[in-house]
Image (cartoon, grey):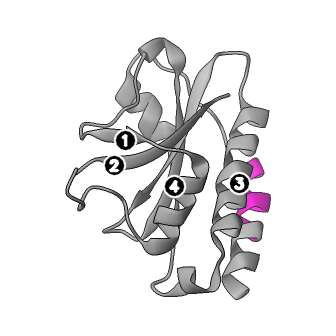
Amino acid sequence: MKFEITLKQWLLELDDEIDIVHSDEINREAQENMMSFGVPDGSMDTLSPEAVRNFISGCSSAFAKNNSDIPMSFYCWYEELALQIRVGCVSKHHGKLPFRCAVEICSIEELASNIKAGISGLFTDKEELFVWQVSI
């Protein structure tokens, strides 16, 4: 329950911290628009997949609220080695997400379940990063 309160606090703070940058260079845009949330080891055990999903959805809503009228893709993934939930956005005109590895686009429910289990997808048989994306 304590970590669920932390997720809610992060969402409250996120709205004030978002300053979306637009760039013709996808990597610059991705770096400037990325936010990371450290997940203490073992804390996911106290959360339901629904709480993780609500956090991810809340992040996408905060980014959408702070976006100007430029079409963008919001995306989220789990950085397994750093124990971080990461979110960001890039302009849709890039036509892709800014990952150099193979990516498996998944549903928000699948991503939330994988985050809860501590699985990024990179260290599975398919070696594809699980990413959820939505237009904002």
Split into 4 quadrants, where in the image is the C terminus? top right
The answer to whether residue 41 is magenta is no
Are the residues flagged by discs 3 and 4 in contact, CB closer than 8 Å?
Answer: no
For residue 104, the mark is 1
Q: Name the residue tied to disc 3.
A: 14
CB of mark 1 within 8 Å of CB of mark 2?
yes
User: Element type at marker 2?
Assistant: strand
Q: Residue at x 43, y 16 (%)?
A: 94
- Few, some or many C-alpha atoms within 10 Å of disc 2 (few <14, some 14-19, many ≥20)? many
Residue 89, image x, y percentages? 54, 34
Rendering quarter of residue 37? bottom right
Q: Is residue 68 visible?
A: yes
Q: Which circle, 3 or 4, is nearer the viewer?
A: 4
C-alpha distance separating marks 1 and 2? 6 Å
2 or 123, nearer to the observer: 123
Residue that appears at 38% across and 66% down = 119
In three-dimensional space, the C-alpha distance between marks 4 and 2, rounded to whole angstroms, equals 10 Å
Instruction: List the residue tagged with mark 4.
Output: 111
Residue type highlighted by circle 2: Leu
- Mark 1 lies on a secondary structure that is strand
Q: Identify which amino acid the numbered label 3 is placed on.
A: Leu
Q: Position of residue 44 (x, y in %)?
A: 55, 79
* Residue depicted at 66% across the width and 81% down the height: 3
Amino acid type for the residue under numbered disc 1: Glu
Q: Please name the amino acid that badge 4 sits on.
A: Leu
